[in-house]
Image (cartoon, rainbow, N blue to C red):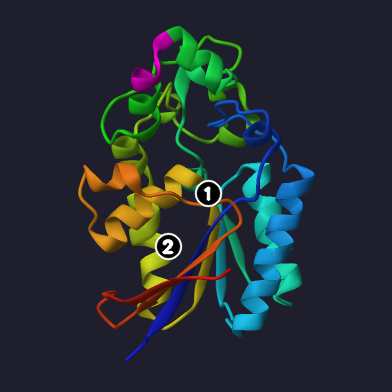
Amino acid sequence: MILAKLVLIRHGQSEWNLSNQFTGWVDVDLSEEGVKQAINAGKLIKQAGIEFDFAFTSVLTRAIKTLHYVLEYSDQLWIPEVKSWRLNERHYGALQGHNKKKAAEKYGDEQVHIWRRSYDVLPPLLKADDEGSAVHDRRYANLDPHIIPGGENLKVTLERVMPFWEDQIAPKLLDGKNVVIAAHGNSLRALSKYIENISDEDIMNLEMATGEPVVYDFDDKLNVLNKSKLD
């Protein structure tokens, strides 16, 4: 018996997705195509008849706007919404802002693939005194500077996401509430790894398409009864 639904949506294409740059915690906007993808996701959710009780997103513009388009075009803009840095994209460290193709030419395709997809290999780290460090961003002013990352792998991202899952998201699902999360490729890969018990090796092959709603049906123990994609 289905107790609750969880819908994960990776934000629509961003301006830096379009220009093939490492983004991470850099706050870039949606591209025109990304807006269209987010609107389409909302329409698909409406067509599927999925109704939400709560919404969660990161503190980054591309995810927040995606959530709002999704809710607007599924006629659910009014539902309660929580933003958290714990749902941010994985921090790509000193790679942030660099073109992925040029990085591959500099470091080699294999090394860049490992940085992007491996579970526990860290990228080159960004120092706290670097002008691009999130330490200087007002949205993280209430955080202990020591927990603001200089770079993350998927393992660290999962460790960062899990307290929010346990404290905020799972209790809603266990209460029979339907939840939507609009976030990022790697924070959602981390959640998917936990939800589906995906191995460290197999998670490298999991892709999250921009703007594609992924629907989980849970029982009363949060076991996955069904997983589907809306397209």
Determine which residue is flagged by label 1. 84
Q: Is residue 49 magenta?
A: no
Residue 157, given in percent of the width and then of the height, sits at 37, 39
- The answer to which of 142 and 158 lies nearer the viewer is 158
Labels 1 & 2 near each other (Cβ < 8 A) = yes
Which disc number belongs to residue 214? none
Left or right, residue 99 beside residue 95: right
Residue 60, given in percent of the width and then of the height, sits at 62, 42
Up/down of 134 relative to 70, above or below: above
Question: Majority secondary structure of the magenta segment?
Answer: helix
- Residue at 43 percent across and 73 percent down: it is 172
Residue 231, given in percent of the width and then of the height, sits at 58, 68
Give the amino acid at mark 1. Ser
* SS class, disc 2: helix
Rounded to the nearest whole Å, what is the CA distance between mark 1 and mark 2?
Answer: 10 Å
* SS class, disc 1: loop
Disc 2 packing (10 Å; few <14; some 14–19; many ≥20): few
Q: Is residue 110 magenta?
A: yes
Give the amino acid at mark 2. Gln
> In which image quadrant can residue 79 be found?
bottom right
Determine which residue is flagged by label 2. 168
The region drawn magenta spans 107-111
